[in-house]
Amino acid sequence: MRLTKFGHACVRIEHAEGAVLIDPGMFTGPEAVRDVRALLITHEHVDHFTEPQVRAAVEANPGLRVYTNRSVARQLEGIGARVTVVGEGDAFELDGLPVTVHGEWHAEIHPDIERIPNIGFLLGGRVFHPGDALTVPPDTVDTLLLPLGAPWLRVGELVDYLRDARPRQAVAIHDETLSQAGRAVHGRLLGPQGPGTGGVAYRTLDVGESVELV
């Protein structure tokens, strides 16, 4: 498997039979959706999903399928069978790649702000994208995509999340709102200079950079 980071929370996962794109939002250019077989969308916030971009991608690629929760699917009416609604506990396959769905709700931003549905996707039992939540995957995974900067998040929660999830490595995503200095501060706290994450390797990728998942 090969992972490529695009803007903010968007990643592309290439596997033996095809490619999958997760959460192409307002910080992701149209080039990210080219030649993928499926779009996986965790929730409706614009940094993860924009309706015009998804509709354009579906129109340009007749074989493209979208898998998402019901609240996003409502905004894609008219696409019909191209959209599959999934939720907690569901499982499906994408060209031989098994995908399971975990989590139900977006992390709380503030008690006065209504929470929205949010799902996470586990691909091949190896790579987990939680969307905007700190959902612990059901089994230990090789690669956890780690939200780094958000209004609902503080770095101490990330340390505890990595201790609980115990992946082999964490790859930073959801960092468009952080400056270069802010990313460096987070990196120190999540690395060997921090309070400790149980030996989880932490890494960052530049936009367009790829890593092989062995």
Image (tube, rainbow, N blue to C red):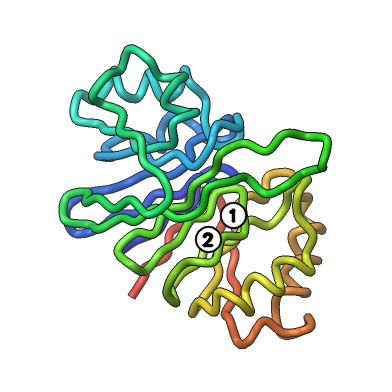
- In what quadrant of the picture does the C terminus appear? bottom left
Look at 52% across and 31% down and name the residue there: 49
Q: Which mark is residue 150?
A: none
Mark 1 crowdedness (10 Å alpha carbons): few <14, some 14-19, many ≥20: many
| Callout 2: SS | strand
Q: Which mark is residue 145?
A: 2
Q: Is residue 61 above or below residue 90?
A: above
Image coordinates of residue 65 in percent, x first then y, are 27, 33
In this view, the residue farthest toward the top is 78
- On screen, residue 42 above or below 185: above
| Dot 2 or dot 1, earlier in sequence | 2
Identity of the residue drawn at 72% across and 69% down: 187
Circle 2/circle 1 CB separation < 8 Å: yes
The amino acid marked with disc number 1 is Ile
* SS at circle 1: strand
Relative placement, left or right, of 205 versus 142 is right
Between the residue at mark 2 and the residue at mark 1, the CA separation in whole angstroms equals 6 Å
Residue, x 63% and y 79% (percent of image)? 163
- Residue in view at x 68 percent, y 45 percent: 176
Q: Estimate the x, y position of residue 191 in percent, counting from the top left.
A: 70, 79
**How many numbered discs, if any?**
2
Crowdedness of circle 2 by 10 Å Cα count: few (<14), some, many (20+)?
Answer: some
Q: Amino acid at mark 2?
A: Leu
Q: Please state, as top left, top right, bottom left or bottom right, where the N terminus lies in the image.
A: bottom left
Q: Position of residue 31 (x, y in %)?
A: 40, 33
Percent coordinates x, y for residue 54 in the rendering: 41, 25
Query: Closer to the camera, 194 or 105?
Result: 105
Which of 209/149 is in front? 149
Q: Tell me: 45 left or right of 142.
A: right
Find residue 173 and name its label: 1
